């Protein structure tokens, strides 16, 4: 009977849960696809930048002392000493971007695996800009394009993490609502023992309060039968108190308030034997 009750209660919400999961998954997939496309655009920018560096005859590489070299090294992208060295660094940067794309695919869209490396790209761009400060117009344009793509990527990542935080918050809220709906449904379908068992498994006083208030609002009279099926005296007492609080909230200041308080006292006398009504 208990298994049947649980199946009946859960069945109605299953399709809506599956639909929500599908919508969330589609949203995640779209965000991840956008980030992968932006990384691909950055990889293409590196290809164009490499071509322009090869073609730029004005690009010079001053001889650097060890001290100056150390002061200009930023991140993993070391200051190039000649054109070949610069091209090797650009190729290394492209490989890093390609690796990020592969990692996103391998980890089934897990963006967190590339977060730190995205931050490193900003340092690489800063260093690249310094190294190519004396380059021609075409090289400078490719650098700006790369910078723009990186800005878009950073914005997409921030948007992705913001959405993930919102989804997690919504997931927790949905779980709370689902628990309340299942509890109310159990009372509506007169599965009082199941509902009493659910209450016995909860240690959070606030959660118990929300469950009882939800039941009172939907099917207030059924609360009496629920109280009857609760075996733990302390839980029975807690639910009786909450029942009284619900009565106060609803009837305070109305002509029915006194009668409802008497009714509540009779419930306490009957189930708790504490003699509130003489």
Image (tube, grey):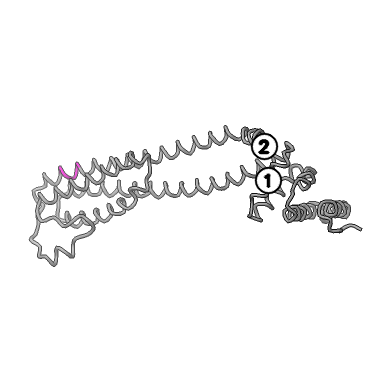
Give the residue pinned by disc 1.
197
Marks 2 and 1: in contact by CB < 8 Å? yes
SS at mark 2 in the image: helix
Q: How many marks?
A: 2
Q: In which quarter of the image is residue 122?
A: bottom left
What label does residue 79 carry, if any? none
Q: Does the magenta stretch include residue 130?
A: no
What is the magenta range? Answer: 47-51
- Which residue is rendered at x = 72% and y = 45% of the image? 215
Closest to the observer: 114 or 132? 114
Whole-number angstrom distance, CA of label 1 to CA of label 2: 10 Å
In the image, taking residue 196 as reference, residue 277 lies left or right, namely: right
Residue 107 location (% of width, % of height): 35, 41
Location of the C terminus by quadrant is bottom right
Q: Along the polypeptide, which appears first: circle 1 or circle 2?
A: 2
Q: Quadrant of the N terminus?
A: top right
Q: What x and y, as percent, mark residue 151?
A: 33, 49
55 up-or-down from 82: above or below: above
Image height of 257 relative to 12, above or below: below
Residue 120 pos. (x, y %) = 28, 54
Instruction: Identify the element where label 1 is drawn.
Output: helix
Please rate how many residues cluster around mark 1, counting C-alpha atoms within 10 Å: few if below 14, some from 14 to 19, many from 20.
Answer: few
Q: Is the magenta stretch mostly helix, strand or loop?
A: helix
Q: How crowded is mark 2: few (under 14 residues within 10 Å), some or many (20 or more)?
A: few
Q: Which of 92 and 273 is in front in this view?
A: 273
User: Can you give x and y, in whole percent of width and height, for residue 9 in the image?
Assistant: 65, 36
Identify the residue under disc 2.
Answer: 2
Task: Compare residues 5 and 117 and report the one nearer the observer.
Answer: 5
Residue at x 86% of width, y 58% of height = 276
Residue 224 relative to residue 95: left or right: right
Quadrant of residue 47 in the image? top left
């Amino acid at each position: 009977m208990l298994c049947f009750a649980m199946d009946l209660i859960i069945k109605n919400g299953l399709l809506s849960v599956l639909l929500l999961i599908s919508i969330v998954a589609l949203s995640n997939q779209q965000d991840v696809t956008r980030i992968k496309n932006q990384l691909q655009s950055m990889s293409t920018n590196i290809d164009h930048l490499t071509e322009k560096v090869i073609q730029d005859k004005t690009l010079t590489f001053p001889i650097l002392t060890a001290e100056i070299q150390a002061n200009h090294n930023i991140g993993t992208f070391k200051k190039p000493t000649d054109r070949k060295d610069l091209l090797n660094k650009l190729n290394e940067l492209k490989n890093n971007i390609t690796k990020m794309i592969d990692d996103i695919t391998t980890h089934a869209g897990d963006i967190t695996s590339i977060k730190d490396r995205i931050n490193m790209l900003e340092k690489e761009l800063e260093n690249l800009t310094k190294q190519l400060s004396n380059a021609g117009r075409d090289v400078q344009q490719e650098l700006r394009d790369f910078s723009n793509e990186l800005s878009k990527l950073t914005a997409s990542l921030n948007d992705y993490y913001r959405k993930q935080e919102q989804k997690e918050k919504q997931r927790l809220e949905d779980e709370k609502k689902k628990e309340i709906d299942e509890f109310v449904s159990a009372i509506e379908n007169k599965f009082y023992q199941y509902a009493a068992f659910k209450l016995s498994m909860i240690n959070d006083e606030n959660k118990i309060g929300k469950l009882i208030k939800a039941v009172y609002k939907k099917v207030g009279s059924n609360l009496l039968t629920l109280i009857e099926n609760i075996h733990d005296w302390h839980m029975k007492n807690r639910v009786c108190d909450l029942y009284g609080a619900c009565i106060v909230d609803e009837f305070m200041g109305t002509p029915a308030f006194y009668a409802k308080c008497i009714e509540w006292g009779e419930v306490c006398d009957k189930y708790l034997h504490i003699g509130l009504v003489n």
